[in-house]
């Protein structure tokens, strides 16, 4: 997902390097054609993981937002997208990402309510940046946050209304990491499995 998102930024003027990367993506897709997302019975509670790199784009220094949502087993909603603003710190980049994930969480909750699957508790969003969590929980503006666009502060209202709850997780446990940056193959395969993306033969054995 991250790789295809990154490649799409150069569609207007691709180079031979981009062509080579595109071929590698196609080889990966061909080699994983028998993979799928494994869904199993669960308690039906929605939870999400949200992450961001910082100034990962060498062209404009913008960061990449990544988030995933699951109902206790395989993921059903995910996103990897370059942010619209230039974050001045890693905490701000994570905060902007958390705001985007919060909007998605609210929409998911509304869809589930229409399907008579009401979420009685706040949707937990796991974030690996304590500073971003503190900004979301602190309604007072100060020097580090006064420049942040007001639209991103909607996450504070979402927390107040009980729609979402930002919780801290260690970076090693951050599943959305796979959507924000290139990873070593071992880490990539580990996170892919934790997201519920498994080979068909493995699912049949289970």
Image (cartoon, grey):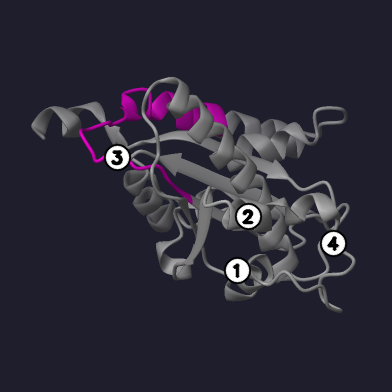
Q: Quadrant of the C terminus?
A: top left
Please say if 20 is above or below 158: above
Where residue 186 appears, as percent x and y from the top left, is 38, 56
Judged from this view, the residue extending furthest toward the left is 205
Q: CA distance from mark 3 to mark 4?
A: 35 Å
Where residue 94 appears, as percent x and y from the top left, is 66, 61
- Give the mark nearer the N terminus: 2 vs 1: 2
Q: Nearer the viewer, residue 51 or 144?
A: 144
Residue 73's disc number: 3
| Figure disc tally | 4
Q: Which of the two marks, 2 or 3, is nearer to us in this view? A: 2
Left or right: where 178 falls relative to 61: left
Q: Dot 1 corresponds to which residue?
A: 133
Q: Mark 2 touching mark 3, by CB under 8 A?
A: no
Q: Is residue 31 magenta?
A: yes
- Give the mark nearer the N terminus: 4 vs 2: 2
Q: CA distance from mark 4 to mark 2?
A: 13 Å
Q: Dot 2 corresponds to which residue?
A: 98
Estimate how packed mark 2 is, as few (under 14), some (14 to 19) or many (20 or more) residues with alpha carbons within 10 Å.
Answer: many
Q: Dot 4 corresponds to which residue?
A: 148
Q: Which of the two marks, 3 or 4, is nearer to us in this view? A: 4
Q: Quadrant of the N terminus?
A: top right
Q: CA distance from mark 2 to mark 1?
A: 9 Å
């Amino acid at each position: 997902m991250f790789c295809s998102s990154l490649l799409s930024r150069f569609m207007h003027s691709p180079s031979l390097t981009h062509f080579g990367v595109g071929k590698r993506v196609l080889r990966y897709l061909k080699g994983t054609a028998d993979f799928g997302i494994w869904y199993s019975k669960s308690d039906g509670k929605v939870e999400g993981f949200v992450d961001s790199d910082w100034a990962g784009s060498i062209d404009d220094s913008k960061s990449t937002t990544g988030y995933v949502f699951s109902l206790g087993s395989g993921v059903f909603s995910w996103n990897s997208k370059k942010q619209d603003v230039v974050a001045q710190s890693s905490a701000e980049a994570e905060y902007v990402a958390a705001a985007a994930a919060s909007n998605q969480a609210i929409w998911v909750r509304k869809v589930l309510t229409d399907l008579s699957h009401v979420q009685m508790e706040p949707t937990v969003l796991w974030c690996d940046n304590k500073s971003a969590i503190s900004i979301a929980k602190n309604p007072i503006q100060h020097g580090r946050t006064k420049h942040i666009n007001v639209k991103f502060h909607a996450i504070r209202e979402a927390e107040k209304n009980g729609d979402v709850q930002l919780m801290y997780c260690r970076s090693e446990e951050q599943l959305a990491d796979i959507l924000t940056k290139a990873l070593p193959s071992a880490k990539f395969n580990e996170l892919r499995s934790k997201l519920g993306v498994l080979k068909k033969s493995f699912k049949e054995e289970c």
